[in-house]
Image (spheres, helix red, strand yellow):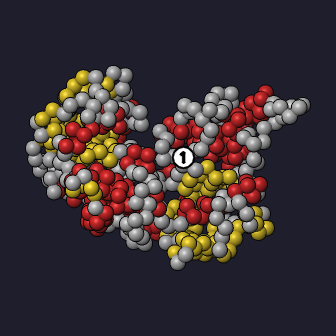
Amino acid sequence: MIRDVSKSFGAVMAVQGVSFPLYAGEAHALLGENGAGKSTLVKILAGVYGADGGGLLIDGEPVAFKGPAASRAAGVSVIYQEPTLFPDLSVAENIFMGRQPLRVGRRIDRAAMNREATDVFKRLGVELDPARVARGLSVADQQIVEIAKALSFNARVLVMDEPTAALTNVEVDRLFEVIRTLRTHGAAVLFISHRLEEAFESCQRVTIMRDGRSIRTAPIEEVTIDDVIRSMVGHDLDNLFPKTVIEPGEVVLEVEHLTRVGVFDDISFNVRRGEIVALAGLVGAGRSEVARAIFGIDKRTSGTVQVHGAELPNGNPLAAMSAGVALVPEDRRQQGLVMDMSIDRNVALASLGRLSRFGLIRRSSERDLATTWAGRLQLKFSRMVDTVSTLSGGNQQKVVLGKWLARKPSLLIIDEPTRGIDVGTKAEVHRILDELVTQGLAVLMISSELPEVLGMADRVLVLREGRITAEFTRAQADEDSVMRAATGQPPAVAA
Protein backbone atom coordinates (compact mmCIF):
# COMPACT_ATOMS: atom_id res chain seq x y z
CA MET A 1 0.00 0.00 0.00
CA ILE A 2 1.30 3.44 -0.96
CA ARG A 3 -0.25 5.85 1.55
CA ASP A 4 -0.17 9.65 1.31
CA VAL A 5 3.41 9.71 -0.02
CA SER A 6 5.01 13.13 -0.62
CA LYS A 7 8.43 14.18 -1.85
CA SER A 8 9.85 17.61 -2.66
CA PHE A 9 13.10 18.88 -4.13
CA GLY A 10 13.63 22.37 -2.81
CA ALA A 11 10.53 24.36 -3.65
CA VAL A 12 9.36 21.81 -6.24
CA MET A 13 6.77 19.32 -4.96
CA ALA A 14 7.41 16.24 -7.13
CA VAL A 15 4.93 13.92 -5.37
CA GLN A 16 2.11 15.12 -3.15
CA GLY A 17 -0.21 12.90 -1.13
CA VAL A 18 -0.15 9.91 -3.48
CA SER A 19 -2.09 6.84 -2.30
CA PHE A 20 -3.10 3.60 -3.99
CA PRO A 21 -3.06 -0.14 -3.17
CA LEU A 22 -1.06 -2.96 -4.77
CA TYR A 23 -2.69 -6.37 -4.50
CA ALA A 24 -1.04 -9.79 -4.75
CA GLY A 25 -1.80 -11.50 -8.04
CA GLU A 26 -2.71 -8.25 -9.78
CA ALA A 27 -1.03 -5.99 -12.35
CA HIS A 28 -1.57 -2.31 -11.58
CA ALA A 29 -0.96 0.36 -14.26
CA LEU A 30 0.57 3.68 -13.17
CA LEU A 31 -0.13 6.26 -15.88
CA GLY A 32 0.59 9.94 -16.28
CA GLU A 33 2.38 12.52 -18.40
CA ASN A 34 6.13 13.09 -18.18
CA GLY A 35 6.67 15.15 -15.04
CA ALA A 36 3.58 13.74 -13.31
CA GLY A 37 5.73 12.24 -10.55
CA LYS A 38 5.84 8.58 -11.62
CA SER A 39 9.66 8.32 -11.70
CA THR A 40 10.01 9.95 -8.27
CA LEU A 41 7.48 7.50 -6.84
CA VAL A 42 9.36 4.57 -8.39
CA LYS A 43 12.61 5.76 -6.79
CA ILE A 44 10.86 5.95 -3.41
CA LEU A 45 9.69 2.35 -3.87
CA ALA A 46 13.24 1.37 -4.89
CA GLY A 47 14.75 3.00 -1.80
CA VAL A 48 16.70 5.55 -3.86
CA TYR A 49 14.73 8.43 -2.31
CA GLY A 50 13.17 8.65 1.11
CA ALA A 51 9.63 10.03 1.35
CA ASP A 52 9.19 13.39 3.06
CA GLY A 53 5.69 12.47 4.17
CA GLY A 54 3.42 9.43 4.24
CA GLY A 55 4.91 6.01 3.65
CA LEU A 56 4.67 2.46 2.41
CA LEU A 57 2.86 -0.45 4.03
CA ILE A 58 3.62 -4.13 3.34
CA ASP A 59 1.05 -6.56 4.75
CA GLY A 60 -0.36 -3.63 6.68
CA GLU A 61 2.93 -2.87 8.42
CA PRO A 62 4.72 0.45 7.76
CA VAL A 63 8.19 0.17 6.22
CA ALA A 64 10.92 2.76 5.63
CA PHE A 65 13.71 1.96 3.17
CA LYS A 66 17.17 3.30 4.02
CA GLY A 67 18.44 2.34 0.58
CA PRO A 68 17.94 -0.01 -2.39
CA ALA A 69 19.19 -3.02 -0.42
CA ALA A 70 16.48 -2.46 2.19
CA SER A 71 13.86 -2.20 -0.56
CA ARG A 72 14.98 -5.52 -2.09
CA ALA A 73 15.09 -7.16 1.34
CA ALA A 74 11.46 -6.13 1.86
CA GLY A 75 10.49 -7.84 -1.40
CA VAL A 76 10.36 -4.86 -3.80
CA SER A 77 12.26 -5.02 -7.09
CA VAL A 78 12.37 -2.39 -9.84
CA ILE A 79 13.00 -3.33 -13.47
CA TYR A 80 13.96 -0.24 -15.42
CA GLN A 81 13.42 0.54 -19.10
CA GLU A 82 17.13 0.05 -19.81
CA PRO A 83 18.48 -3.12 -18.14
CA THR A 84 21.86 -2.83 -16.41
CA LEU A 85 23.58 -6.17 -16.83
CA PHE A 86 27.29 -6.93 -16.71
CA PRO A 87 27.85 -7.76 -20.40
CA ASP A 88 30.89 -10.03 -19.95
CA LEU A 89 29.34 -12.20 -17.24
CA SER A 90 26.97 -15.09 -17.81
CA VAL A 91 23.21 -14.83 -17.39
CA ALA A 92 23.37 -16.83 -14.15
CA GLU A 93 26.22 -14.68 -12.79
CA ASN A 94 24.15 -11.58 -13.44
CA ILE A 95 21.19 -13.04 -11.59
CA PHE A 96 23.19 -14.05 -8.50
CA MET A 97 25.79 -11.26 -8.50
CA GLY A 98 27.15 -10.84 -4.96
CA ARG A 99 25.31 -13.86 -3.56
CA GLN A 100 26.54 -16.80 -5.62
CA PRO A 101 26.15 -20.30 -4.12
CA LEU A 102 29.50 -21.51 -2.77
CA ARG A 103 31.25 -24.87 -2.53
CA VAL A 104 33.70 -26.03 0.07
CA GLY A 105 36.60 -23.58 0.20
CA ARG A 106 34.27 -20.71 -0.68
CA ARG A 107 34.58 -21.32 -4.40
CA ILE A 108 31.58 -20.43 -6.55
CA ASP A 109 29.37 -23.43 -7.32
CA ARG A 110 28.62 -22.69 -10.96
CA ALA A 111 26.60 -25.86 -11.48
CA ALA A 112 24.28 -24.97 -8.57
CA MET A 113 24.02 -21.39 -9.80
CA ASN A 114 23.03 -22.53 -13.32
CA ARG A 115 20.48 -24.99 -11.86
CA GLU A 116 18.87 -22.27 -9.76
CA ALA A 117 18.77 -19.89 -12.72
CA THR A 118 17.16 -22.61 -14.87
CA ASP A 119 14.52 -23.17 -12.17
CA VAL A 120 13.68 -19.45 -12.15
CA PHE A 121 13.35 -19.38 -15.96
CA LYS A 122 11.03 -22.40 -15.77
CA ARG A 123 8.86 -20.52 -13.28
CA LEU A 124 8.68 -17.67 -15.79
CA GLY A 125 7.89 -20.04 -18.66
CA VAL A 126 10.86 -18.92 -20.81
CA GLU A 127 13.87 -20.71 -22.23
CA LEU A 128 17.19 -18.96 -21.70
CA ASP A 129 20.63 -20.54 -21.34
CA PRO A 130 21.98 -19.50 -17.91
CA ALA A 131 25.57 -20.17 -19.03
CA ARG A 132 25.55 -17.83 -22.03
CA VAL A 133 27.30 -14.48 -21.81
CA ALA A 134 24.94 -11.49 -21.38
CA ARG A 135 26.59 -9.49 -24.17
CA GLY A 136 24.47 -9.76 -27.30
CA LEU A 137 21.19 -10.53 -25.53
CA SER A 138 18.19 -8.69 -26.95
CA VAL A 139 16.62 -6.00 -24.77
CA ALA A 140 13.69 -8.37 -24.19
CA ASP A 141 15.97 -11.15 -22.92
CA GLN A 142 17.87 -8.67 -20.76
CA GLN A 143 14.58 -7.71 -19.14
CA ILE A 144 13.78 -11.39 -18.55
CA VAL A 145 17.14 -11.70 -16.77
CA GLU A 146 16.26 -8.67 -14.61
CA ILE A 147 12.89 -10.25 -13.77
CA ALA A 148 14.63 -13.54 -12.94
CA LYS A 149 17.01 -11.63 -10.65
CA ALA A 150 14.00 -10.09 -8.89
CA LEU A 151 12.39 -13.51 -8.41
CA SER A 152 15.64 -14.90 -7.01
CA PHE A 153 15.28 -12.24 -4.28
CA ASN A 154 11.77 -13.62 -3.64
CA ALA A 155 10.32 -10.28 -4.73
CA ARG A 156 6.64 -9.81 -3.94
CA VAL A 157 6.28 -6.45 -5.67
CA LEU A 158 7.75 -5.93 -9.17
CA VAL A 159 7.85 -2.44 -10.60
CA MET A 160 8.23 -2.38 -14.39
CA ASP A 161 9.17 1.08 -15.71
CA GLU A 162 8.45 1.38 -19.46
CA PRO A 163 9.35 -2.29 -20.07
CA THR A 164 8.02 -2.43 -23.65
CA ALA A 165 9.53 0.77 -25.09
CA ALA A 166 12.22 -1.02 -27.13
CA LEU A 167 10.47 -4.37 -27.75
CA THR A 168 8.96 -5.89 -30.88
CA ASN A 169 5.32 -6.98 -30.89
CA VAL A 170 6.34 -10.61 -30.39
CA GLU A 171 8.57 -9.68 -27.45
CA VAL A 172 5.79 -7.60 -25.91
CA ASP A 173 3.46 -10.61 -26.11
CA ARG A 174 6.06 -12.75 -24.35
CA LEU A 175 6.49 -10.12 -21.62
CA PHE A 176 2.73 -10.09 -21.04
CA GLU A 177 2.83 -13.88 -20.66
CA VAL A 178 5.58 -13.46 -18.05
CA ILE A 179 3.46 -10.87 -16.21
CA ARG A 180 0.55 -13.34 -16.15
CA THR A 181 2.88 -15.99 -14.75
CA LEU A 182 4.12 -13.61 -12.04
CA ARG A 183 0.53 -12.84 -11.05
CA THR A 184 -0.29 -16.55 -10.91
CA HIS A 185 2.56 -16.96 -8.40
CA GLY A 186 1.11 -14.18 -6.24
CA ALA A 187 3.32 -11.22 -7.15
CA ALA A 188 1.99 -7.68 -7.37
CA VAL A 189 3.12 -5.94 -10.56
CA LEU A 190 3.25 -2.14 -10.95
CA PHE A 191 3.30 -1.47 -14.71
CA ILE A 192 4.34 1.98 -16.01
CA SER A 193 3.90 2.75 -19.71
CA HIS A 194 3.02 5.53 -22.12
CA ARG A 195 1.33 2.95 -24.35
CA LEU A 196 -2.19 3.07 -22.97
CA GLU A 197 -3.41 0.09 -24.99
CA GLU A 198 -0.82 -2.13 -23.26
CA ALA A 199 -2.02 -1.06 -19.84
CA PHE A 200 -5.58 -2.02 -20.76
CA GLU A 201 -4.39 -5.37 -22.13
CA SER A 202 -2.18 -6.46 -19.23
CA CYS A 203 -3.49 -4.75 -16.06
CA GLN A 204 -6.48 -5.19 -13.75
CA ARG A 205 -6.32 -1.81 -12.01
CA VAL A 206 -5.10 1.68 -12.92
CA THR A 207 -3.87 4.77 -11.06
CA ILE A 208 -3.57 8.05 -12.94
CA MET A 209 -1.17 10.78 -11.78
CA ARG A 210 -1.11 14.46 -12.70
CA ASP A 211 1.12 17.22 -11.32
CA GLY A 212 2.49 14.95 -8.59
CA ARG A 213 -0.92 13.82 -7.32
CA SER A 214 -2.87 10.60 -7.74
CA ILE A 215 -6.03 11.71 -9.57
CA ARG A 216 -7.90 8.44 -9.83
CA THR A 217 -7.58 4.73 -9.00
CA ALA A 218 -10.09 2.28 -10.46
CA PRO A 219 -10.51 -1.24 -11.84
CA ILE A 220 -9.43 -1.18 -15.47
CA GLU A 221 -12.86 -2.24 -16.74
CA GLU A 222 -14.43 0.89 -15.22
CA VAL A 223 -12.42 3.34 -17.33
CA THR A 224 -11.82 3.97 -21.03
CA ILE A 225 -8.73 5.28 -22.82
CA ASP A 226 -10.52 8.62 -23.24
CA ASP A 227 -11.14 8.71 -19.46
CA VAL A 228 -7.44 8.07 -18.82
CA ILE A 229 -6.29 10.78 -21.25
CA ARG A 230 -8.74 13.27 -19.77
CA SER A 231 -7.46 12.54 -16.25
CA MET A 232 -3.80 12.69 -17.33
CA VAL A 233 -3.92 16.04 -19.09
CA GLY A 234 -6.81 17.63 -17.18
CA HIS A 235 -8.96 18.19 -20.29
CA ASP A 236 -10.18 16.45 -23.43
CA LEU A 237 -7.52 15.83 -26.06
CA ASP A 238 -9.60 15.74 -29.22
CA ASN A 239 -6.82 16.61 -31.63
CA LEU A 240 -4.00 14.13 -31.02
CA PHE A 241 -3.21 14.12 -34.76
CA PRO A 242 -3.62 17.73 -35.97
CA LYS A 243 -3.06 16.99 -39.64
CA THR A 244 -3.44 19.70 -42.28
CA VAL A 245 -3.65 18.21 -45.77
CA ILE A 246 -2.03 20.46 -48.38
CA GLU A 247 -0.95 20.04 -51.99
CA PRO A 248 2.67 18.77 -52.01
CA GLY A 249 5.25 20.82 -53.87
CA GLU A 250 8.40 19.87 -55.75
CA VAL A 251 10.42 16.73 -54.96
CA VAL A 252 12.96 17.34 -52.19
CA LEU A 253 14.29 13.80 -51.66
CA GLU A 254 14.67 11.20 -54.41
CA VAL A 255 15.90 7.72 -53.41
CA GLU A 256 16.55 5.25 -56.21
CA HIS A 257 17.47 1.55 -55.88
CA LEU A 258 19.12 2.09 -52.49
CA THR A 259 20.77 -1.12 -51.28
CA ARG A 260 22.91 -2.11 -48.32
CA VAL A 261 23.72 -5.79 -48.69
CA GLY A 262 22.19 -7.91 -45.94
CA VAL A 263 20.17 -5.00 -44.52
CA PHE A 264 17.81 -3.59 -47.19
CA ASP A 265 17.44 -3.97 -50.95
CA ASP A 266 16.28 -1.85 -53.91
CA ILE A 267 14.57 0.94 -51.96
CA SER A 268 13.07 3.66 -54.18
CA PHE A 269 10.75 6.53 -53.18
CA ASN A 270 10.54 10.30 -53.01
CA VAL A 271 9.41 12.94 -50.52
CA ARG A 272 7.93 16.25 -51.64
CA ARG A 273 7.84 19.67 -50.08
CA GLY A 274 4.87 19.98 -47.68
CA GLU A 275 4.49 16.21 -47.32
CA ILE A 276 4.96 13.61 -44.58
CA VAL A 277 6.00 10.20 -45.89
CA ALA A 278 5.99 7.46 -43.24
CA LEU A 279 8.13 4.33 -43.26
CA ALA A 280 6.04 1.70 -41.47
CA GLY A 281 6.74 -1.93 -40.66
CA LEU A 282 7.79 -4.21 -37.84
CA VAL A 283 10.90 -3.55 -35.75
CA GLY A 284 13.87 -4.99 -37.68
CA ALA A 285 12.34 -4.38 -41.11
CA GLY A 286 15.18 -2.00 -42.03
CA ARG A 287 13.44 1.37 -41.63
CA SER A 288 16.03 3.06 -39.41
CA GLU A 289 18.84 1.59 -41.49
CA VAL A 290 17.39 3.19 -44.63
CA ALA A 291 17.29 6.56 -42.84
CA ARG A 292 20.90 6.18 -41.69
CA ALA A 293 22.03 5.40 -45.24
CA ILE A 294 20.16 8.40 -46.65
CA PHE A 295 21.81 10.69 -44.10
CA GLY A 296 25.21 9.08 -44.71
CA ILE A 297 25.87 7.52 -41.31
CA ASP A 298 25.99 4.08 -42.95
CA LYS A 299 27.43 3.55 -46.43
CA ARG A 300 25.12 2.23 -49.11
CA THR A 301 26.24 -0.63 -51.34
CA SER A 302 24.48 0.81 -54.38
CA GLY A 303 21.77 3.23 -55.42
CA THR A 304 21.52 7.01 -55.29
CA VAL A 305 20.17 9.67 -52.93
CA GLN A 306 19.34 13.08 -54.38
CA VAL A 307 18.28 16.24 -52.53
CA HIS A 308 16.86 18.99 -54.72
CA GLY A 309 18.22 17.10 -57.74
CA ALA A 310 21.84 16.96 -56.52
CA GLU A 311 23.27 13.56 -55.61
CA LEU A 312 24.63 13.14 -52.08
CA PRO A 313 28.03 11.48 -51.72
CA ASN A 314 28.03 8.04 -50.11
CA GLY A 315 28.57 7.93 -46.34
CA ASN A 316 28.98 11.66 -45.75
CA PRO A 317 26.64 13.15 -43.08
CA LEU A 318 28.28 16.59 -43.38
CA ALA A 319 27.36 16.70 -47.05
CA ALA A 320 23.78 15.72 -46.19
CA MET A 321 23.61 18.48 -43.57
CA SER A 322 24.99 21.03 -46.05
CA ALA A 323 22.30 19.94 -48.53
CA GLY A 324 19.59 20.73 -45.98
CA VAL A 325 18.96 17.28 -44.46
CA ALA A 326 18.32 16.86 -40.72
CA LEU A 327 18.09 13.57 -38.80
CA VAL A 328 16.34 13.17 -35.44
CA PRO A 329 17.48 9.67 -34.38
CA GLU A 330 15.46 6.98 -32.64
CA ASP A 331 17.66 6.97 -29.52
CA ARG A 332 17.66 10.62 -28.45
CA ARG A 333 19.73 10.01 -25.30
CA GLN A 334 22.59 8.11 -26.96
CA GLN A 335 22.60 9.59 -30.46
CA GLY A 336 20.72 12.89 -30.33
CA LEU A 337 21.92 14.64 -27.17
CA VAL A 338 24.97 15.16 -24.99
CA MET A 339 23.24 14.44 -21.70
CA ASP A 340 25.78 16.18 -19.44
CA MET A 341 25.81 19.34 -21.57
CA SER A 342 23.49 22.31 -21.02
CA ILE A 343 20.19 22.78 -22.84
CA ASP A 344 21.39 25.81 -24.82
CA ARG A 345 24.60 24.11 -25.96
CA ASN A 346 22.68 21.03 -27.11
CA VAL A 347 20.38 23.20 -29.21
CA ALA A 348 23.38 25.01 -30.74
CA LEU A 349 25.43 21.86 -31.49
CA ALA A 350 24.39 21.51 -35.14
CA SER A 351 24.78 25.26 -35.83
CA LEU A 352 28.26 25.97 -34.47
CA GLY A 353 29.61 26.93 -37.90
CA ARG A 354 26.97 29.65 -38.22
CA LEU A 355 27.51 30.89 -34.66
CA SER A 356 31.30 31.06 -34.75
CA ARG A 357 33.12 34.33 -35.38
CA PHE A 358 36.86 34.18 -36.08
CA GLY A 359 36.82 30.62 -34.73
CA LEU A 360 35.16 31.61 -31.44
CA ILE A 361 31.61 30.95 -30.26
CA ARG A 362 29.96 33.45 -27.94
CA ARG A 363 27.82 32.01 -25.16
CA SER A 364 25.26 34.74 -25.77
CA SER A 365 24.83 33.53 -29.36
CA GLU A 366 24.20 29.97 -28.20
CA ARG A 367 21.75 31.19 -25.59
CA ASP A 368 19.86 33.45 -28.02
CA LEU A 369 19.48 30.62 -30.55
CA ALA A 370 18.31 28.18 -27.87
CA THR A 371 15.87 30.71 -26.38
CA THR A 372 14.30 31.29 -29.78
CA TRP A 373 13.66 27.60 -30.37
CA ALA A 374 12.64 26.92 -26.77
CA GLY A 375 9.87 29.46 -27.28
CA ARG A 376 8.78 28.11 -30.65
CA LEU A 377 8.68 24.51 -29.39
CA GLN A 378 7.13 25.42 -26.01
CA LEU A 379 10.02 23.80 -24.14
CA LYS A 380 9.50 23.40 -20.40
CA PHE A 381 12.70 23.95 -18.42
CA SER A 382 14.09 25.72 -15.35
CA ARG A 383 17.29 27.35 -16.70
CA MET A 384 19.01 27.18 -20.06
CA VAL A 385 22.29 26.30 -18.35
CA ASP A 386 20.80 23.19 -16.72
CA THR A 387 21.95 19.89 -18.22
CA VAL A 388 19.57 18.39 -20.75
CA SER A 389 19.40 15.26 -18.54
CA THR A 390 17.17 17.25 -16.13
CA LEU A 391 14.40 17.47 -18.75
CA SER A 392 11.53 15.04 -19.25
CA GLY A 393 11.66 12.69 -22.25
CA GLY A 394 9.25 14.82 -24.25
CA ASN A 395 11.24 17.99 -23.64
CA GLN A 396 14.48 16.19 -24.54
CA GLN A 397 12.84 15.28 -27.85
CA LYS A 398 12.00 18.95 -28.38
CA VAL A 399 15.66 19.88 -27.77
CA VAL A 400 16.75 17.43 -30.49
CA LEU A 401 14.12 18.89 -32.82
CA GLY A 402 15.24 22.43 -31.98
CA LYS A 403 18.87 21.53 -32.64
CA TRP A 404 18.06 20.47 -36.19
CA LEU A 405 15.33 22.98 -36.99
CA ALA A 406 17.75 25.78 -36.06
CA ARG A 407 19.62 24.83 -39.25
CA LYS A 408 16.45 25.53 -41.28
CA PRO A 409 16.52 22.19 -43.15
CA SER A 410 14.44 21.42 -46.22
CA LEU A 411 14.16 17.71 -45.31
CA LEU A 412 13.59 16.37 -41.79
CA ILE A 413 14.11 12.65 -41.18
CA ILE A 414 12.55 11.84 -37.80
CA ASP A 415 12.81 8.33 -36.33
CA GLU A 416 10.19 7.36 -33.70
CA PRO A 417 9.17 10.98 -32.98
CA THR A 418 7.06 10.20 -29.89
CA ARG A 419 8.60 7.04 -28.44
CA GLY A 420 8.60 7.10 -24.64
CA ILE A 421 6.76 10.42 -24.25
CA ASP A 422 3.34 11.04 -22.78
CA VAL A 423 0.13 11.57 -24.69
CA GLY A 424 -0.04 15.33 -24.08
CA THR A 425 3.50 15.87 -25.38
CA LYS A 426 2.76 13.58 -28.33
CA ALA A 427 0.03 15.97 -29.38
CA GLU A 428 2.52 18.87 -29.14
CA VAL A 429 5.12 17.05 -31.28
CA HIS A 430 2.44 16.25 -33.86
CA ARG A 431 1.36 19.90 -33.86
CA ILE A 432 4.97 20.97 -34.46
CA LEU A 433 5.35 18.54 -37.36
CA ASP A 434 2.09 19.71 -38.93
CA GLU A 435 3.14 23.35 -38.60
CA LEU A 436 6.52 22.64 -40.20
CA VAL A 437 4.95 20.77 -43.12
CA THR A 438 2.46 23.56 -43.83
CA GLN A 439 5.47 25.89 -43.99
CA GLY A 440 6.96 23.72 -46.74
CA LEU A 441 9.25 21.26 -44.92
CA ALA A 442 9.52 17.73 -46.34
CA VAL A 443 9.33 15.05 -43.63
CA LEU A 444 10.37 11.40 -43.71
CA MET A 445 8.90 9.84 -40.55
CA ILE A 446 9.63 6.41 -39.11
CA SER A 447 7.16 5.17 -36.51
CA SER A 448 6.18 1.86 -34.95
CA GLU A 449 2.88 3.34 -33.71
CA LEU A 450 0.24 2.69 -36.35
CA PRO A 451 -2.19 5.36 -35.08
CA GLU A 452 0.62 7.90 -35.50
CA VAL A 453 1.39 6.69 -39.02
CA LEU A 454 -2.26 6.76 -40.07
CA GLY A 455 -2.94 10.05 -38.32
CA MET A 456 0.02 12.09 -39.62
CA ALA A 457 1.26 10.63 -42.93
CA ASP A 458 0.29 11.75 -46.43
CA ARG A 459 1.78 8.54 -47.83
CA VAL A 460 2.76 5.29 -46.12
CA LEU A 461 5.57 3.01 -47.35
CA VAL A 462 5.61 -0.41 -45.70
CA LEU A 463 8.93 -2.24 -45.29
CA ARG A 464 9.29 -5.96 -44.66
CA GLU A 465 12.65 -7.72 -44.42
CA GLY A 466 14.45 -4.81 -46.05
CA ARG A 467 12.10 -4.31 -48.98
CA ILE A 468 9.18 -2.00 -49.69
CA THR A 469 6.14 -4.28 -49.92
CA ALA A 470 3.37 -1.69 -50.28
CA GLU A 471 2.63 2.01 -50.70
CA PHE A 472 -0.62 3.64 -49.56
CA THR A 473 -2.02 7.11 -49.95
CA ARG A 474 -3.57 8.70 -46.86
CA ALA A 475 -7.03 7.73 -48.11
CA GLN A 476 -6.01 4.10 -48.77
CA ALA A 477 -4.09 3.43 -45.55
CA ASP A 478 -5.77 1.60 -42.69
CA GLU A 479 -4.48 -0.55 -39.86
CA ASP A 480 -5.41 -3.87 -41.45
CA SER A 481 -3.80 -3.09 -44.83
CA VAL A 482 -0.56 -1.79 -43.29
CA MET A 483 -0.20 -4.77 -40.93
CA ARG A 484 -0.89 -7.25 -43.74
CA ALA A 485 1.87 -5.69 -45.83
CA ALA A 486 4.23 -5.58 -42.82
CA THR A 487 3.73 -9.28 -42.02
CA GLY A 488 3.66 -10.60 -45.57
CA GLN A 489 -0.05 -11.42 -45.63
CA PRO A 490 -2.07 -10.96 -48.84
CA PRO A 491 -4.44 -7.97 -48.97
CA ALA A 492 -7.93 -8.57 -47.64
CA VAL A 493 -10.45 -9.55 -50.29
CA ALA A 494 -13.36 -7.13 -50.54
CA ALA A 495 -16.70 -8.70 -49.68
- Is 257 left, or right, of 170 in this rendering? left
In the depicted structure, whether residue 54 falls above or below residue 490: below
What residue is at 46 percent from the left and 58 percent from the top? 389
x and y, in percent, of residue 47 in the image: 68, 60
What residue is at 60 percent from the left and 64 percent from the top? 41
Q: Quadrant of residue 240?
A: bottom left
Give the amino acid at mark 1: Glu
In the depicted structure, whether residue 427 falls above or below residue 198: below
Of residue 109 and residue 208, the one placed in the foreground of this image is 109
x and y, in percent, of residue 93 in the image: 70, 35
Q: Quadrant of residue 144?
A: top right
Where's the C terminus, which quadrant? top left
Q: Is residue 474 visible?
A: no
Q: Secondary structure at mark 1?
A: loop
- Is 348 left, or right, of 232 in this rendering? left
Q: Which residue is denoted by mark 1 in the rendering?
A: 82
Of residue 182 and residue 419, the one placed in the foreground of this image is 419
Q: Is residue 319 visible?
A: yes
In the depicted structure, whether residue 408 falls above or below residue 307: below
Where's the N terminus, which quadrant? bottom right
x and y, in percent, of residue 422 in the image: 43, 59
In the depicted structure, whether residue 348 falls above or below residue 63: above
x and y, in percent, of residue 103 in the image: 86, 31
